[in-house]
Amino acid sequence: MAAPPVPPVPLVSRRRRLRVGDWLERAAVVVAALVILVAVVGPFVAPHDPYRVALDQSLQPPSAEHWFGTDADGRDVFSRVLAGARVTLLATFVVIAVATVIGVVLGTAAALGGRIVDEILMRICDIGLSFPAMILALGLAAAMGPSLESAVIALALTWWPGYARLVRTLVRETLHAEYVDAARSIGMSRWRLITRHVLPNSLDTLYVQITLDVAAVILVISGLSFVGVGAQPPSAEWGALVAAGRNNVVNGWWVVALPGAAIALTAIAFNLVGDRLRVRNDPTLGNGGKA
Amino acid sequence: MLRFIVRRLGLMALVLFGLAAIVFLMAQVVPGDPARTAAGRNATAEQVAQARERLGLDEPLLVQFGRHLSRLAHGDLGTSLFTSRPITADLADVLPASVELVLAAMLVNLLVAVPLGVISAARRGRAADLAARLIVMFGAAVPVFWLGLMLQYLLAAQWQVFPLTGRLSFGVSVPERTGMVTVDALLAGDLGAFSDALAHLVLPAVTLAAPFVAVVARTLRSTMISALDRDFVTLARAKGASEWRVVIRHGLRNALVPSSTIIGMQLGWMLSSTVLVESIFGRPGIGAYAVNAVLQNDLFAVVAVVLVIGVAFVIANFLVDLVHLWLDPQLRRAGV
């Protein structure tokens, strides 16, 4: 392709602009990967036992020995943040996995199951999408008895309608693609058609949505723990860490500030990664989406 | 247009019915025996049986659901186990504080997000745009409860710019009329109390607004960018209109309609976010009431809060749809 006659000056400034965005996005990928790594190995590399109480070490400010200081019970905050990465990310992962499975099954059923099934499932989705997931999850988790498991189940049960509706739309679009017609015409069974051709080709957009939802779920899960219906003490879940430090914030800002910063940083990283995937996945956002 | 309204009303009725069903199910999954809880810790088997009969717990589930619906229709949300008062009365006491907070947060939201979105779109790709987008990025990812604690620590505890908690300083009081302290102070003509109430409102409102600012600024930016690329903007520029006139009169005005839907819906979201904010700042609103109910294991109160916030949310969204219909003539003609 011949190079179009582009004036050089705007091109340079555009390139410079791209660099800032690219730098941020690369940093986000690194941070997200690092958080996942910490979730896997965190408890093994933690300098101290995240659950060992040492009352003589209560509320020490950050130092070489305790990078993030210690909490009111003398536990090392840095070790607790490392250990909490696993708790928070695992809870988030389970919520999204369960919601995705329910969403894919019901969304596909709605797309393929005929008018009545579709109508019933979509009206249920309407109801689910009509309220903030957090407030429904709060009620459900409180009813089941406050614990991280309750919060996870409650949130998964309130999070799936968005996925179901998205999958329904995607499957319906893919159903009319030529290669699906071709597969159908050679006599492929309905089940095989759906699992081998329709679903794999319709779910790209779902993956992007899932990545974008990671941050949202982290914020809600830690919020539920903060309010008291999620992870209970002495869990190192990030929201629970912030909640545990809130009564001592004047004597020990670090107990609240640093776990909360971990939540914010993780959420920013996953949001940026999700944005990047969305732009790559969407051909209408050409030009790398840098408009 | 009438068809649209009727359909929306039908959907709203369905959603409210669904909410009532969900809330009913919540009360069913409680571990333990509600009759025993109601009868008290040292109740005899006979007293428990009496409580079961009194509460209708020995009847079929469908009959219980029917009675649950009729109670809701009469505005009866049950009795709080903690305050021993009707929950409806409790909520009537706490709601004004939350409404005051939500309205203040919405004001902060608009005052920050609209300029942010406009500057971001008008100076697309420049330093101002980048700065605005960084603010949005942070606002979308920050946990509100953490932001609240940090603002409280820095601006109230350390630098003492704002009061720590509560709605009024010690010794200041206003005659109660609406339950919203700022409004009551104005009604009483007490400017000192008004500024005191306002100072108490700033930090909670800013905290509550943060995530919503991100959403509005981002939406406004993208809708304004597509509006500014339209032909009528080129025409306005060709006619020699000043850049700010183009941006405000042609860009912002056309971007406001889609953004207004989102801003309206946020009122409901904000009410649910009070759960995370009010208890930090010691504001006795519906969110703090919910947190307290959770801590006291007062399940009926928790469920009632879910119900009330849910209903407020549904009604707010219905009103938003009506306003949108009124603002956007294209929608009316299409008869969607």
Image (spheres, coloured by chain):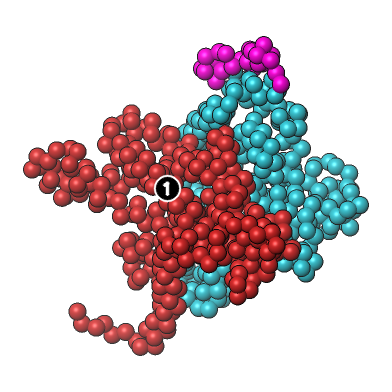
Chain colours: A red, B cyan
Q: Residue A73, relative to residue A114: is it above or below?
A: below
Q: At 35% from the left edge and 52% from the top edge, which residue is drawn?
A: A206
Residue B281 image position (x, y, % from top left): 73, 53
Q: Nearer the viewer, residue B287 or B118?
A: B287
Q: Nearer the viewer, residue B240 or A53?
A: A53
Query: Which image quadrant is residue B82 in?
Result: top right
Residue A185 image position (x, y, % from top left): 10, 42
Residue A106 image position (x, y, % from top left): 34, 37
Horizontal placement of A68 versus A22: left or right?
A: right
What amino acid is labelled 1 in the image? Val
Q: Which span is picked out in magenta?
A: B42-66
Is A161 magenta? The answer is no
Query: How many numbered marks does the figure carry?
Result: 1
Query: Which image quadrant is residue A40 in?
Result: bottom left
- Residue extending farthest to the bottom is A8
Quadrant of image for the C terminus of chain B: top left
Is the stretch drawn in magenta largely helix, strand or loop? helix
Residue A106 visible in the picture: yes
Give the class, few, some or many, for how many residues have Cα within 10 Å of label 1's Cα (few <14, many ≥20).
some
Q: At 55% from the left edge and 64% from the top edge, which residue is drawn?
A: A48
Mark 1 sits on what residue? A94
Q: At 28% from the left edge and 45% from the top edge, which residue is drawn?
A: A171
Horizontal placement of B318 versus A180: left or right?
A: right
Q: Could you say whether the residue bearing mark 1 is in a helix, strand or loop?
A: helix
Residue B318 visible in the picture: no
Is B59 magenta? The answer is yes
Q: Residue B75, relative to residue A13: is it above or below?
A: above
Residue B233 image position (x, y, % from top left): 47, 69
